């Protein structure tokens, strides 16, 4: 066993900078040892839910890992027929379209204070209002868990407090989603048995290689995966971006990279064959990321810049101080962004649009990647990316140009029970809050209407 792995596995806190929060963030190292009995209780709980539609509400690490496990299960083997719907947007069209008949709801938030989860909870509670059709996944005694108990919700999965959100795939956040699709307990056990066989020597080698390449100017990580496994790069993107994008430095993960051969790229290919292999890859990359943070001299477990956009959103909602300047015409995006880009920069397309228009935003990303080659171009839907790559954009190296997309249409009016603002107001405030925060950090960010 290599020195870094050995120190990681014995939880040597001196691996990281003195200010690191690692002392209460290393519980993920124990997760592969989760017992079949613990997993069986989750599997039995999900099987006691009678509804066909399962809405899973979560943001960032609370949902991306769950999506990754669910996609792997959905692509292989027998299916149990459940309709698992992931919701990680406050777009009013998304909220208005959610089914409430023959529907159960999973509310997933580590802190229990996630605005998106809380507001969607109120919306669905107002329409469904039956405690036996709700499941809560959260840390013990969190505000979400306490609210659920007050409302009589009994299906509660408690997650370990010493596991950060982006390292939490192999906790209730992942296992509840997988269990709803599983045809047997073997499906749920598979990622854990795989993680037990993870190649940690390979993880250390990867960390050392990436650190060496970083020193030679390769600060972009191109992530390849088959289109049918597109959630794997999304999960790894948030792990790398939020763990290693801070203190003015960090790796820039680039899923679906149109220019992977560029001189500033390292590359990784991820195409696990089954749930067991996926579990191994998840644990290997969590270890790689933790060790790479040590080599880079940063704390891979904190997220110092995430709260800024949340605070800006709250301020806008309270003061009604929305951005009133007109966005730029989308037809000018290539020209306007090219005027901002410098050598070594990357461009990110932050699309605050209806998720049904995902491919429209992706086409803009591809356009920019072609016109700006060999620059890396990334793409994320808001508000989802605020909980994944948002840390990197604000706290990482000042080599980002944000092309924010907003819709040039009126949103449907969908009230939020107990609030004096609508989901449309919240969605707009999140877009405005992100743009204002980027500008306050001196980042180059332009807004376009699509």
Image (tube, rainbow, N blue to C red):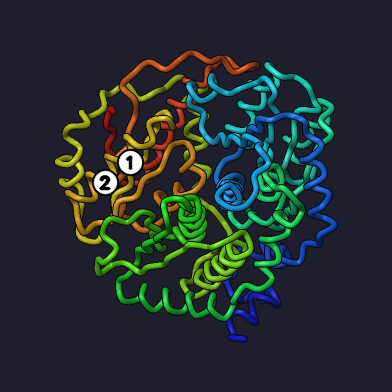
Q: Is 398 located above or below residue 131 in the figure?
A: below
Looking at the figure, which quarter contains the N terminus?
A: bottom right
Residue 56 found in image quarter = top right
Q: Are marks 1 and 2 in contact (CB under 8 Å)?
A: yes
Residue 110 at least partly seen = no
Residue 328, compared with residue 395, is above or below; it is above
Q: Could you tell me how far apart the alpha carbons at marks 1 and 2 are, in whole angstroms?
A: 6 Å
| Left-right relation of 177 to 385 | right
Q: Quadrant of residue 450?
A: top left
Q: Residue 15 at what x, y percent from top left?
A: 59, 75
Q: Residue at x 78, y 47 (%)?
A: 43
Instruction: Determine which residue is flagged by label 1.
Output: 362
- What residue is at 58 percent from the left and 54 percent from the top? 166
Q: Quadrant of residue 409?
A: top left
Residue beneath disc 2: 366
Q: Categorize mark 2 by other alpha carbons within 10 Å: few (<14), some (14-19), many (20+).
A: some
Please state which of residues 194 and 367 is positioned toward the viewer in this rendering. 194
| Residue nearest the observer in this picture, 379 or 295 | 379
């Amino acid at each position: 066993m290599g020195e870094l792995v050995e120190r990681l596995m014995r939880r040597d806190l001196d691996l990281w900078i003195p200010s690191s929060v690692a002392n209460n963030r290393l519980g993920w190292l124990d997760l592969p040892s989760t017992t079949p009995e613990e997993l069986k209780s989750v599997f039995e709980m999900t099987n006691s839910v009678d509804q066909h539609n399962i809405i899973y509400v979560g943001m960032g690490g609370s949902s991306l890992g769950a999506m990754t496990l669910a996609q792997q299960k959905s692509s292989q083997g027998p299916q149990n027929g459940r309709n698992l719907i992931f919701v990680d947007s406050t777009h009013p069209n998304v909220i208005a379209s959610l089914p409430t008949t023959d529907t159960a709801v999973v509310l997933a938030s580590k802190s229990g204070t996630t605005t998106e989860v809380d507001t969607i909870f109120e919306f669905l509670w107002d329409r469904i209002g039956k405690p036996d059709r709700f499941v809560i996944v959260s840390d013990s005694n969190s505000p979400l868990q306490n609210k659920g108990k007050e409302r009589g919700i009994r299906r509660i999965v408690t997650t370990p407090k010493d596991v950060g959100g982006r390292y939490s795939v192999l906790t209730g956040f992942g296992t509840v989603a997988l269990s709803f699709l599983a045809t047997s307990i073997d499906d749920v056990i598979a990622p854990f048995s795989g993680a037990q066989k993870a190649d940690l020597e390979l993880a250390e080698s990867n960390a050392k290689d990436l650190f060496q390449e970083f020193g030679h100017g390769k600060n972009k990580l191109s992530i390849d995966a088959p289109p049918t496994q597109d959630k794997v790069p999304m999960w790894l993107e948030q792990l790398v971006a939020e763990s290693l994008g801070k203190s003015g430095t960090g790796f820039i993960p680039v899923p679906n990279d149109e220019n992977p051969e560029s001189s500033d790229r390292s590359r990784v290919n991820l195409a696990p064959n089954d749930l067991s292999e996926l579990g191994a890859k998840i644990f290997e990359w969590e270890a790689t990321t933790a060790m790479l943070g040590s080599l880079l001299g940063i704390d891979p477990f904190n997220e110092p810049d995430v709260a800024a956009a949340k605070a800006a959103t709250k301020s806008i909602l309270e003061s009604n101080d929305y951005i009133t300047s007109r966005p730029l015409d989308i037809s000018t995006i290539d020209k306007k962004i090219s005027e901002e880009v410098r050598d070594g920069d990357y461009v990110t397309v932050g699309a605050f649009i209806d998720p049904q228009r995902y491919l429209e935003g992706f086409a803009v990303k591809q356009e920019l990647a072609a016109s700006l080659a060999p620059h890396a171009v990334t793409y994320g839907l808001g508000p989802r990316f605020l909980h994944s790559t948002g840390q990197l954009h604000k706290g990482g190296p000042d080599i980002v140009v944000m092309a924010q997309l907003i819709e040039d249409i009126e949103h449907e009016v969908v009230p939020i029970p107990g609030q004096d603002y609508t989901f449309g107001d919240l969605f707009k405030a999140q877009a405005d809050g992100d743009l204002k925060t980027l500008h306050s950090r001196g980042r180059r960010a332009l807004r376009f209407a699509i």
